[in-house]
Image: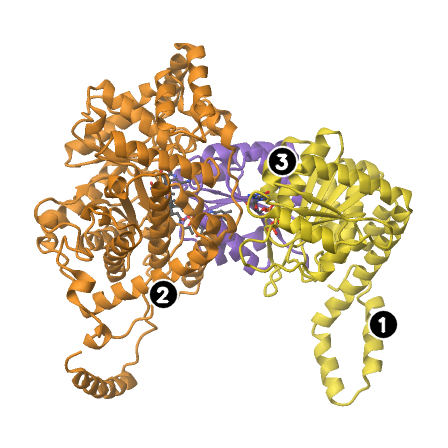
Chain colours: A orange, B yellow, C purple
Amino acid sequence: MEKEELYKEKLEEWKKIYKKSIESMPERQEFKTLSGIDLNIFYSPLELKNFDYFENLGNPGQYPFTRGIHPTMYRSRLWTFREFSGFGDAIETNRRLKYLIEHGETGLSIAFDYPTLLGLDSDDPLTKGEFGKAGVAINTLEDMQLMFKDIPLRDISTSMTINGPAAILWGLYILAGESQGARRNGLRGTIQNDILKEYMAQKSFIFPPEPSLKLVIDTIEFGSKELPLWNPISISGYHIREAGATAIQELAFTLANGLTYVEKSVERGLDVDDFAPRLSFFFDAHIDFFEEIAKFRAARRIWAREIKRRFSPRKERSLWLRFHTQTAGVSLTAQQPENNIIRTAIEAMAAVLGGTQSLHTNSMDEAWALPTEKAVMIALRTQQIIAEESGIPNVVDPLGGSYYMEWLTDKIEDEVYKYFDKIDNLGGVIKGIRSGFFQREIAESAYRFQRDLEENKRVLVGVNKYKIDEKLEIPILRIPDELEDRHLRRLKNYKSNRDMEKVNFALKEMQKNADEKNLMPYIIDSIKAKATLGEIVKALKDVWGEYIEPVIY
Amino acid sequence: MNIEEILLDKKEMSKIMTRIENGDEDLSSEILKHIKGARIIGVTGVPGSGKSTLITKLSSRLLEKGHRIGIIGVDPSSPFSGGAVLGDRVRMKDLNRFENVFIRSISTRGKIGGLSYYTADLVNVLDAAGYDTIFIETVGTGQDEVDVFNIAHTIIVLQVPTLGDEVQIIKAGQLEIGDIYIVNKADQGPADEKIKELNLILKKRENGWQPLVIKTVAVKNVGIEEIINALDEHWNFVKETGLFKRKINSRIKYMLKQHALEKLDKIMESEVVDSYAEQIIKGRNMHEIVNEIINKVGGEYGKGGIV
Amino acid sequence: MRKIRVLIAKPGLDGHDRGAKVLARSLMDEGFEVIYTGIHQTAEDIVRTAIEEDVDVIGLSVLSGAHMYHFRRVLELMKENGINDVLLIGGGIVPEEDKENLIKMGVDAIFNPGTSIQEISDFIRKNLRRPL
Ligand code: B12
Ligand SMILES: Nc1nc2c(ncn2[C@@H]2O[C@H](COP(=O)(O)OP(=O)(O)OP(=O)(O)O)[C@@H](O)[C@H]2O)c(=O)[nH]1
Ligand SMILES: [Mg+2]
């Protein structure tokens, strides 16, 4: 480093003034990031001795893509405004989707209800009390068609938060699209389909890890051949983070999962360049502004390096880490809910400064219920203000080159590699899941976070500081019971108007080929025979069994 | 009402267990009069080796055959707070479809050895209530968990295949107490090597029993039938060789010892000890003090434990 | 003093277990014996466990929006089984209005997000229905 001696000399000088200064004005507390990284009071070239612009950053759109995957970033195209939504039945959700499109949303994002997430039809006794509460219930092709009635699937991109039964919901979507006249190879969108993080964090798994992973690879293979514009997986850190992980754990576990999918796909015989460009990611934007931005930057860099090193792709696109972001639900409070608008705005800014491709901003009523229309509108407007008024998107990676930002990006990268080593030593991700490693790491962080709150080591405004007595009168979204009746009638009708022989034949064929062949065509055939989601899942459970997780607290 | 009738009501039986766990010795002695001689099976092995899963599978099978099953799952207590999180039931959810099974989770409450002070007493409650087969899942630290040997007629020791180059030496104590050795998770690694190894090391016991080694995949129900058979074989052995009688004797002796130890431990953890410590420093005779403590166990702290 | 036993259960299909696990572990720190049965429990599972484990408290954690249904079922089964000396409390995502209705139905307390563990354990200690 040039002038290193000078910097050191100046630092010694500074230390003297600093010492004097803290005598009369001591520091208020210890300073750490939200994830517990110890922070210096400031950063200088001394911390970036090995910094090399082209090695560490590159220009936007150039390897290792730290500054962004596109040369123009938001100058050409803003990120996609995508608000997660869905509740009640297909018809009701269709109404909400149209409302969002009308107000400037540029991509759809579907939330499914609990029964659907777990592959159960709404007439299953296990689903009592759960209909439509946390998302929309989709059991049949008819439901899927109704949900997108008058929404042209040829033109819009749709993201579906579905994992255990993702392949089946995808099949339903493909057929719904085709029934509108949209060609398969033109459909755009994402299924979350990231089963590994289900065992770690979200807990909507169905089958044991091994067959589940096989099914995911089936979808990646199928997508690479038949739906070239579709993202067959959204490798998600969001859930890991929200379950309690730190930023470092979020990134490390997510990238480890991602690398596992790539490995398994290559083992299947796929060419990395045929599917890697369609892998997408999904991260959390939490409240520690700089740490989150650094995390996004580190994510792109690590992914590009590791894919290059391990799989030597020919296409540059295979190195891109494209991601969706959601602001941190868990950072939002039930108390003084209006404050959540501010938190979300800060988090959304971090996502944009981190170069996200798509964004969901949470609503102020997050800790009370699914959002009301008003609350969603404010959340959407938050993005629009950042995009259209703030000037933030004008320049690519504006924080690049900041001593702090570069140091923090490097630091996160280092810590992520430490986790990679640990995971390798455990024998990989699946072994780590089986032994409870990830679950334990996440639970431990969640517990520590709670302890910090209890001991007032961490402040949550309105919760453990600046509290007020308030009578909460925020409007709550209610799901009318009629929607369930309407849905159940439709389901019954659907089930009574079909040829059971055809249904059973299709399901049997699927079962026979469950372990050996790519299941997508069999699933699609079963749907065409009018099998329901619940029936298809049940048939696969009979072959693969169900997963019961070890409890780790 | 007579105690046997009370025990027919699960809720009442459960409350009796709570009282016993909190040191009601009169109740303990009353229960002891009603035990019927259930078959007691101890299951031990390192954490996560599949103890709960195995017990669930074995129980399902036995329940289908008409047995009444009692299960006691022991988990460690926190050395700091004395509290505990008890989680063995999670794996046993499948048993909820049966009526004739009773599962109780207990914490070691600070005791070492794999069981709590009153585990034997709780086993007696289940026995007296007519549960004919009782499983005890020990803590599962895999170390020094030999207490169960005093209570159980049959001990199942779980092992998992050695993975890669990780060395997994079988703990000496575990090698001596087992009647049936299970190599579980055979789907996850080279189980046959482990089996060979076990067959080499396990010698015929003094009482004439040659320990059996069985390979299983508990989650997939593989090997369960073999264990059921092995259990029957060992049960016959227990009854034919007089071991059954001897075990009742050892269970009662063990109980007595635990009751006494529990009181002693409580005294040793109370403030009383501080003053003794001071006295020792000041030169008082150790023997005298120990006698005084022993007297306390029988005296003021005698009944119902220290309050 | 005897140990207070608490069942922490997640009824229904809800997979939000962060709060339940943090709570289980924190109550252990408070010296309670906590029985945690994992996700996806039915009301039948829960009440049976409460009986066999002879708990002082049943605590339901529900973030799925299906709280009205699950609390009602657990209350029904508690009544059927003559359980009247056990506290029934809960937490998670429960709007104010529902909270009031649940209390009217016989639930002892509901704790919203942001409640400190201290507050929860104090409540349990003060409101136990059985002598210590
Ligand atoms: C974290 C989170 C997630 C994580 C969960 C990770 C995990 N393993 O737990 C992830 C990202 C995976 C997730 C997924 C989903 N989520 Co979510 N999630 C949240 C979020 C942001 C925070 C919950 C949390 O963990 N808080 C931290 C813990 C410590 O607090 P807590 O659980 O509230 O517990 C405290 C109190 O409530 C109380 N308490 C809780 N339980 C109990 C029990 C007892 C006995 C007692 C005494 C007290 C008590 O004490 C605790 C300490 O204060 C909430 C919104 C919010 N801000 O609350 C949404 C929220 C719960 N999620 C929601 C939804 C819809 C979902 C999904 C169904 C979305 C979908 N359709 O795909 C999925 C389903 C996942 C599943 N399998 O269940 C909705 C539920 C809507 C409703 N009830 O009407 C919420 C409210 C967000 C929203 N407004 O839309 N989610
Ligand atoms: N692959 C495989 N997994 C198994 C087998 N048996 C049990 N498991 C899994 O191993 C994990 C631990 O099983 P448990 O039955 O809880 O083990 P345990 O010994 O009771 O564990 P602790 O009580 O925590 O000490 C669970 O995830 C089981 O599903 C098996 O034969 N093969
Ligand atoms: Mg166990």
What residue would you read off at disc 3? B221
**As drawn, B300 above or below A255:** below
What residue would you read off at disc 1? B295
Q: Observer-nearest residue: A187 or A456?
A: A187
- Residue A497 location (% of width, % of height): 39, 9
Residue at 72% x, 50% y: name it.
Answer: B199
In the image, what residue type sits under mark 2? Gly
Question: For numbered disc 3, what is the local secondary structure?
Answer: loop
In the image, what residue type sits under mark 3? Asn
Q: Is residue B300 left or right of residue A273?
A: right
Snapshot quadrant of residue B118:
bottom right
Counting residues from the start of the chain, the first of labels 1 and 3 encountered is 3
Q: Chain of mark 1?
A: B
How far is disc 2 from disc 1 in space, using C-alphas? Answer: 53 Å
Q: Is residue A396 left or right of residue B254?
A: left
Looking at the rendered structure, whether the residues under marks 1 and 3 are on a common chain is answered as yes
* Label number found at residue A36: 2
- Residue A88 location (% of width, % of height): 34, 28
Residue at 21% x, 28% y: name it.
Answer: A185
> Residue B22: in sight, yes or no?
no
